[in-house]
Amino acid sequence: MVALVHVPADPDHPDAWTVEGTVRVGDAVDLAIHGSTDFSLDVATTRATMTEPHRRVHRIVALPAGAPRTPESVVGRAMIGLPLVGNAHLAVIYVGVHPDQRRRGIGAALWDAGLDIARDAGRRVVISDSSYATEPEPGPDALESPTGSGRIPVHDDATRFALARGFTLEQVVRHSVLTLPARVDHLRRDPGASYRVHLMQDEYAAEWLDGLALLKTRMSTDAPSAGLELTEDPWDADRVVADAADIRRRGQGFLVAVVEHVPTGEPAAFSMVEYPLDKPAVVFQGDTLVLREHRGHGLGMVAKIAVLDALAGVRPRAARIHTWNAQENAHMLAINVALGFRQASVDAEWQRAL
Ligand SMILES: CC(C)(COP(=O)(O)OP(=O)(O)OC[C@H]1O[C@@H](n2cnc3c(N)ncnc32)[C@H](O)[C@@H]1OP(=O)(O)O)[C@@H](O)C(=O)NCCC(=O)NCCS
């Protein structure tokens, strides 16, 4: 019934056409949920994700058995992400099926193939996510997050599929959008002489590599992760350098603001955005973190506004910033709401043991 083809990273491989197939299905799934393709990766970027330095990525496409082996025949796709440094006990598996082709066993076939890869790699936990256009009101159509913050629709293909495949809802994540230009002058605060902002574009400054490694490591432990079995993802200076190169290789640029604690010369906070170079209107908020010992001084807002100010010069056609925050992450959400971010959709974070 369904033929599965593994997507090769090599553009000269005879099955290289599958990359375009996976992009086409991804666009169709996103259009059905969000009415936009802001999040979709183009062919070159998708291919680049398959040779990242700190994560092994497998992709599989599904097509009706006997259909011509062309991108147009692809009706489903799976992505299996295997972290290689921290969290090497888990696999992230994402399955998407064209909205016109559902309930024909395509998702199940892709899921089974993804599980095989995760098992062969020795992973013991699977995490997945799904997106919904709207967050339902409390009631019979709402599945409540076990954290107590956030809900997703029960009567939805993705929820039914995830529950049928043995997943548990662990966390609900709010997706918000800030329309640019942002009006933030009323939020500007002088952080005082103890703190100084350093901005970097597309490359991390050599003197901040160790500081960024600390900030990014803390990001993996300090962002709320509910019941998800996530552990520390350790970064060092080499990984920070490799990360910058990898963002550029994927056809993206980035801006990062590091807030220095001047008396010690140590990092106190940072915020980062990334943007696909082929989509001038689109920006993604990346990490934002204030180290525990520096909280309560408004440094999250300082770092974010520093990035916004720089972004206006670097990406003058940027029209919107997308961000995702756990619904229980009250402090981060408060900053984002104050900046003008408005909820656009909602995501579920699913987990199951293998
Ligand atoms: C989730 C998704 C991949 C399912 O794809 P699919 O090809 O329709 O799935 P299948 O036909 O293989 O269904 C497998 C099982 O999931 C469950 N299921 C899927 N959709 C369902 C629905 N609308 N209602 C009830 N059960 C459903 C059923 O148990 C089904 O088995 P059955 O057909 O034997 O009853 C598809 O709906 C999709 O692409 N959704 C958007 C992307 C997404 O959110 N992916 C992440 C999911 S964790």
Image (cartoon, rainbow, N blue to C red):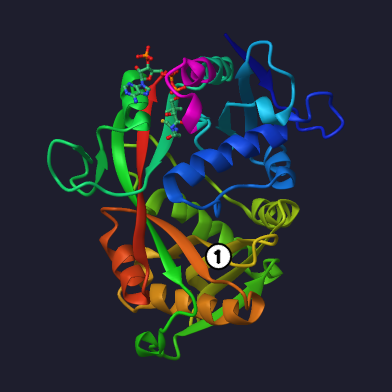
Q: Nearer the viewer, residue 32 or 195?
A: 32
Residue interval drawn in magenta = 99-111
Residue at left offset 36%, top offset 74%: 340
Q: Position of residue 206 (x, y in %)?
A: 70, 68
327 lies left or right of 212: left
Q: Position of residue 196 (x, y in %)?
A: 51, 84
Task: Please check the rendered image and state whether residue 110 is part of the magenta-colored stretch, yes or no.
Answer: yes
Q: Position of residue 8 (x, y in %)?
A: 75, 28
Q: Nearer the viewer, residue 175 or 287?
A: 175
Label 1's element? strand
Can residue 191 be spotted in the picture?
no
Task: Please check the rendered image and state whether residue 57 is part of the magenta-colored stretch, yes or no.
Answer: no
Q: Position of residue 40 (x, y in %)?
A: 59, 47
Q: Main secondary structure of the magenta part?
A: helix
Residue at left offset 35%, top offset 78%: 298
Q: Which residue carries the number 1 mark? A: 273
